[in-house]
Amino acid sequence: MPISSIADLIRTHGTERGGQPALTADGRTVTFAQLDARSNQVAQALAGEGVGAGDRVAYLDANAAQYYELLFGGAKLGAVNVAVSWRLAPAEIAAIITDAQARVLVVGAAFATTVEAVEAELPGVKKVIVVDGSARHQDYDEWVAAAPALDPGVCAKPDDVRIQLYTSGTTGLPKGVMLTEHNLLSLLRMGGETLELGPDTVNLVAMPLFHISGSGYSLSGFHAGCHTVLLREAHPGAILRAVAEHGVTNLFAVPAVLRTMLGVPGIAELDLSSLRTIAYGASPISLDVLVRAIETFRCDFVQVYGLSETAGTVTMLTPEDHRRALEVAGTGAGGTVGAGGT
């Protein structure tokens, strides 16, 4: 079955690779078939709230499985996913949700009080659902469980907007970047090919899903049929432990996280031999950090440059580029290498 939309991504893998692990998050692993069925339920639950093609569904939480359930479930209805940065102040969160004109908001329990503080400023939101529930709002799992696991069967067009990311790459309030099916699928295919992602890949995702470095990178893995290991936040120690525990082959990290990973106590005792490729970007990296990372992790490194507006990576330095550059520079050179995007 060809993958011609974000919804087809989970439909296809759910049918052709249904028994294979799709996502490990918060200590629980689900298969592609289970995630496909769960997203069908989410699609029906959203439809029950009046959500249809073009409507925005907002998500406010750290990285969690619910993000993908909402993304794929919304895609099966033609809805648009809006992941909101939980690092923002309540007024900034309210401004984004209002600008997006979100009809439904799913929020993690840790941020329920934040939403309640600005709820009066969200007149367009018709339904708030809280993961693990709250005194005022319906529990997410109960909301999903009440819906049948039936795919609405909506077929997307290439120009349909599927994800709306907010970026502060310009002055003033964050702007919404509308990424279409064509935008995303073009980059997902390229990402999978250039990073050599495939069904045998265990892909660790720790960057925030409200940023293209998290959502875009992880969807490249899903498109390729990877097993995705999701961490709620990019804690260096947790990343290293996850690599050792799950046999992670690929990951993306910003240079600051890579630098901190190198200083984690006990790193030498961890089995990190499964690593094949580490991609990095979003800011410059010092040559010292890069050299130490290559010597420590003993895998290929790929530097990527991209933007939210381009749906992710548009150019990169390959492992061979790194080898040539380090041979020329020598391991004792200073300075920085490259830069990232927004």
Image (spheres, rainbow, N blue to C red):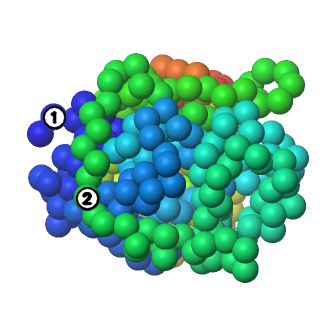
Q: Is residue 1 left or right of residue 273?
A: left
Q: Position of residue 39 (x, y in %)?
A: 36, 57
When the figure is inspected, residue 40 is found, relative to residue 159, above or below; the finding is below
Secondary structure, mark 1, is loop
Q: Which quarter of the figure is the N terminus placed in?
A: top left
When the figure is inspected, residue 304 is found, relative to residue 224, above or below; the finding is above
Q: Position of residue 65 (x, y in %)?
A: 47, 63
Q: Which three-letter amino acid code belongs to the residue tagged 2? A: Leu
Label 2 CA crowd tier, 10 Å (few <14, some 14–19, many 20+): some
141 vs 237, nearest the viewer: 141
Give the total of numbered labels. 2
Q: Is residue 204 left or right of residue 336?
A: left
Q: Is residue 286 left or right of residue 138?
A: right
Residue holding disc 2: 150
Question: Which is closer to the viewer, label 1 or label 2?
Answer: 2
Residue holding disc 1: 2
- Asked whether residue 282 is in view, the answer is yes
* Residue drawn where x is 81% and y is 63% of the image: 116
Marks 1 and 2, the one that precedes in the sequence: 1
70 vs 119, nearest the viewer: 119
62 vs 104, nearest the viewer: 104
Secondary structure, mark 2, is loop
- Asked whether residue 203 is in view, the answer is no
